[in-house]
Amino acid sequence: MANRTKRGSENLESLPRMTRTLRLAAAQMGPTQRADSRAQTLQRMIAMLDKAAADGAGLVVFPELAFTTFFPRWMMERQELDAFFERAMPNPQVQPLFDRARALKVGFHVGYAELTDDGRRFNAAVIVGRDGRILSQYRKVHLPGTQEPRPGPGFQQLEKRYFANGDLGFRAFRAPPDLGRAVMGTLICNDRRWPEAWRVLGLQGVELVCCGYNSAAFDPYGRNNEDERLRTFHSTLVAQANAYMNSTWAVCVAKAGIEDGAGLIGGSVIVDPNGRVVAEAKTTADEVLVADADLDLCRHGKEKMFDFAKHRQPHAYEMIVRQMGAVAPD
Amino acid sequence: MANRTKRGSENLESLPRMTRTLRLAAAQMGPTQRADSRAQTLQRMIAMLDKAAADGAGLVVFPELAFTTFFPRWMMERQELDAFFERAMPNPQVQPLFDRARALKVGFHVGYAELTDDGRRFNAAVIVGRDGRILSQYRKVHLPGTQEPRPGPGFQQLEKRYFANGDLGFRAFRAPPDLGRAVMGTLICNDRRWPEAWRVLGLQGVELVCCGYNSAAFDPYGRNNEDERLRTFHSTLVAQANAYMNSTWAVCVAKAGIEDGAGLIGGSVIVDPNGRVVAEAKTTADEVLVADADLDLCRHGKEKMFDFAKHRQPHAYEMIVRQMGAVAPD
């Protein structure tokens, strides 16, 4: 009887922890061909939303530039380019996804190409609450590729041409109670390879990082021998280590497979604050991964090994902001 | 005949690459008990040096605080403490290691407790050239543990009590030709979990990071359920990811096993600039790992994905130096 009472009080104590468990879904998307219609792509996304909701997910993470093919691989003129951009979020073309999510009471993260009223273009993402309200917007800071098309055959990587560097920084925010009051932040694709980006989120106590990506499975210029396996390994490695070093959950989600002949890695993962992969995509097609994230698992790291206030030495890091490129000793 | 000529010129072109291949050895040390004599420990180190030299290594990496047991696990008074510190490097007690290395024409890295003439104490390491000359000194920046002993039974972690934070920053240096002119840097133990430390070395074009460690295999206070396997995973993960994100070779070397009842993880690794483990310790005892490091393998990452001058966005990283602890949104 004493034991039962004790157990009862333990349960009471653990109640606040229970509300901090959030069921996450990573909605990896297979390839989207340039000829695919917007409506077709949206239907695939809604089907994954339905599946994730049926699995009990509270938040579904879609990849970078989820509504279209990865268009920066082609040199295009402005008019042609505009078709890939959203002038508002939401907008009539994507409204059905927002409507379905709200009806299912599921929050989601989705990446898209943003064209602002004043003509600026960003590689962006929003996180939408379970009530359909936009909770945060992020604009990709680290743009890979080139501004000018590279000569020769093969695909381009023209993100530096088509997008401006994100001007919103790495802003974490506190999600509402129905998302566990998680401290959340967004990174997009290449951002995830930069520990500085994770650390700025970590310095805001981030507990859940959403990151969509389109990452080439092989060199678009055929100029090196990196293969798909190595590139997938890199993608998983940076998610694991940066999640561990910032004691955060991370959901990293690919658009994957062969788009008009260009290969994209899969390897979508849900990673815990110890850097362990708790769910991993098995395909390069549409695939929903689900995992329960106990947000309080972040506390162990944040209060011990990575108690920043106790252990960081910012005076020794000045070079990180003072210097952009590497300068080797003679 | 035309083909042979072509191959000949290719060989000429690749000659400078060949001189940039350095055979590395990680000299993992098993436990050193408090009662072990200095001479005994030095003999073990010299035996590993001999083995590494016989295997053709040009540089041998010994762990953190290699000459003694991991003494910060005990509360000690000054006089008792002093026995674990070196007042000069080299000094008569460690001279036989320096002598043997010079005779073998092998460079080495070794960690030790430093007591300066003016009474300051650091957790330090030196890298010694193949000619016996000290090429660089480093003093550990990130000190884990506590300043005051923690109550209760079990071991202490008193690095914050016994050492001052390193005052030399993270300085990379260019090694001499007989070490491949590698850009080298040192981290010590806990430093390796801080991406800022690796990045400051990365911003100096580092090609080889030496890092010794003594990392607990289980919580010294028994206050959590992390196990040795998870802790070894963390150790390997941060070496791999930070090597990849800075396109550098890394040699991370443990003092391992059970010291006077306190467990230390093994898991010494040599990691390539892709973050791949190329050699890994199988034991928690004295063990020499050897791998050939093609220093020019660093170039691919440094010139492409991690071309810092092209892709970093330091203005977005200000929080890293402006803020020490984490501040979560309301």
Image (cartoon, coloured by chain):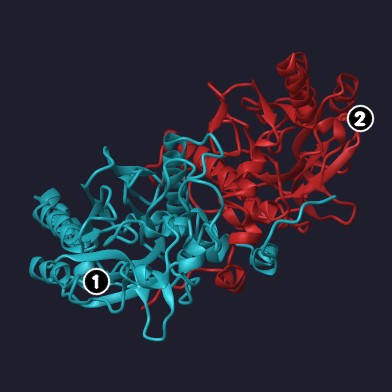
Chain colours: A cyan, B red
Q: Nearer the viewer, residue A100 or A203?
A: A100
Q: Chain of mark 2?
A: B
Q: What quarter of the picture does the N terminus of chain B occupy?
A: top right
Does residue A268 sit above or below B320 in this rendering?
above
Residue at image mark 1: A128
- Residue A53 location (% of width, % of height): 12, 57
Quarter assignment of residue B96: top right
Residue at position x 70%, y 42% in the image: B207
In the image: residue B14, left or right of residue B198: right
Mark 2 neighbour density, 10 Å: few (under 14) some (14–19) many (20 or more)? some
**Which residue is most to the bottom?**
A118
- As helix, strand or loop, the secondary structure at mark 2 comes to loop
Q: What amino acid is found at the position of numbered circle 1 in the picture?
A: Val
Residue A205's place in the image compared with B35, above or below, is below
Quadrant hosting residue B44? top right
Please give left or right for residue A190 compared with residue B66 in the image. left
> Could you tell me which quadrant the C terminus of chain B lies in?
bottom left
Q: Which type of secondary structure does the marked residue at label 1 adopt?
A: strand
Q: Amino acid at mark 2?
A: Asp
Q: Position of residue A120 (x, y in %)?
A: 44, 79
Q: CA distance from mark 2 to mark 1?
A: 63 Å
Is any atom of residue B264 visible in this view? no
Q: Is residue A67 left or right of residue B164?
A: left
Q: Nearer the viewer, residue B195 or A135?
A: A135
Q: Residue A62: where, in percent of width, then height?
A: 27, 58
Task: Answer whether labels 2 and 1 touch (C-beta < 8 Å).
Answer: no
Give the chain letter at badge 1. A
Residue at 82%, 48% in the rendered image = B115
Q: B114 and A10: which one is in front?
A: B114
Point out the frontmost of discs 2 and 1.
1
Q: Which residue is mark 2?
A: B131
Instruction: Left or right? Give the position of A287 relative to B114.
Output: left
